[in-house]
Image (spheres, helix red, strand yellow):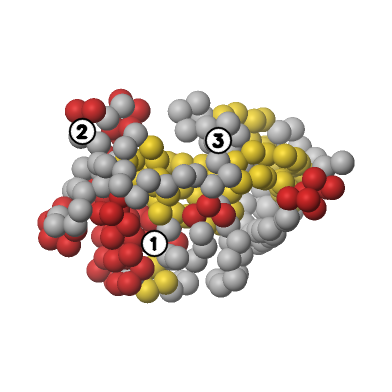
Amino acid sequence: MRGPADFIFHIEAVRDEESQTILQESLDVDPPLPIRRFTDRSSGNRYFRLHQPDPGPLHVRYQAIVQLTPKITDDNAPEVPIADLPEDVLQYLMATRYCESDLIGRTAERTFGAVTPGYPRVRAIAEWIKTHIDYEVGSSNSLTSARDVLVARAGVCRDFAHLGISFCRALNIPARLLVGYSRFEEPPPDFHAIFEAYLGGVWYPFDATGLAPVDSLVRIGTGRDAKDVAFATIFGMAIGTAVDPVINEIPRHEAELLLV
């Protein structure tokens, strides 16, 4: 760092989530700084704040052992009429900065309007994206939106998720971004983004990249699009130099030994 800086980090696994249980976790900051934690009540997203008063390096290390419980999928889950949607779900129908569902409505209707409504339609959206959009590291940046991806036909995981969200919202299906840690062989380990659709009163995850099973993702947070779930927000003269997620699958009996 070149001078004083403030940070808001969003890298800790979500608590109070039915599909995952945090068995053990730790957070280390070097140099040691006061850590101020807070949780967004509506989403469950966990954050912590740091203030670095002096120039120099800052290292943040988060470790956790998380037990995952796959959700039961209903392949016939229906779409919920707008009149029956809970108030806290309505926000996930609206166009947002990276998900311009209002601008791609005609494409969504033409491509998926005749598909069986509900879970089959959202599954068809995910499959279409996987087939028609190339996964290409470096093909997008922090300004790339779903509409840009649809035109360029290339992107990375967050772009695939944004496009899935946009198609769903254009068809009046609430959808949101889900980010977390997931283990896959290629590309190298990193944070991963998929999308969720609200069907039959339940949020169902879909991964349009096909890089990893959706039930292997450790949830960090959810949001309307990427601006709601940034892993680090920096105020001041600081530059990120490295992000090195390491994700390992631990058999249950080995995890139990680690907790003794």
Tell me, yes or no, whether the two marked residues, 1 and 2, touch with CB atoms within 8 Å. no
Taking depth in this image into account, of 146 and 240 the one nearest to the observer is 146
User: What is the distance, in whole Å, between disc 1 and disc 3 at their CAs?
Assistant: 23 Å
At x 39%, y 61%, the residue is 208
| Neighbours of disc 3 within 10 Å: few (<14), some (14-19), many (20+) | few
Residue flagged by tag 1: what amino acid is it? Ala
- Going by the numbered disc 2, the residue's amino acid type is Ile
Residue at 19%, 57% in the rendered image: 115
Q: Name the residue rendered at 37%, 74% in the picture.
A: 134
* Residue under numbered circle 3: 17
Which of disc 2 and disc 1 is earlier in sequence? 2
Dot 2 falls on a residue whose secondary structure is: helix
- Label 3 sits on a secondary structure element that is loop
Q: Residue at x 57, y 54 (%)?
A: 216
Instruction: Say above or below: 102 vs 36.
Output: below
* N-terminal-most mark, 1 or 3: 3
The image's mark for residue 208 is: 1
Of labels 3 and 2, earlier in sequence is: 3
* Residue 173 disc label: none
Image-quadrant location for residue 78:
top left
Relative horizontal placement of residue 49, taking residue 97 as reference (left or right): right
Label 3 to label 2, Cα distance in Å? 25 Å
Q: How far apart are marks 1 and 2 (CA)?
A: 25 Å
Mark 1, other Cα within 10 Å: few <14 / some 14–19 / many ≥20: many
Residue sitting nearer the eye, 206 or 64: 206
- Kindly tell me whether residue 201 is visible in this rendering: yes
Contact, CB < 8 Å: mark 1 with mark 3?
Answer: no
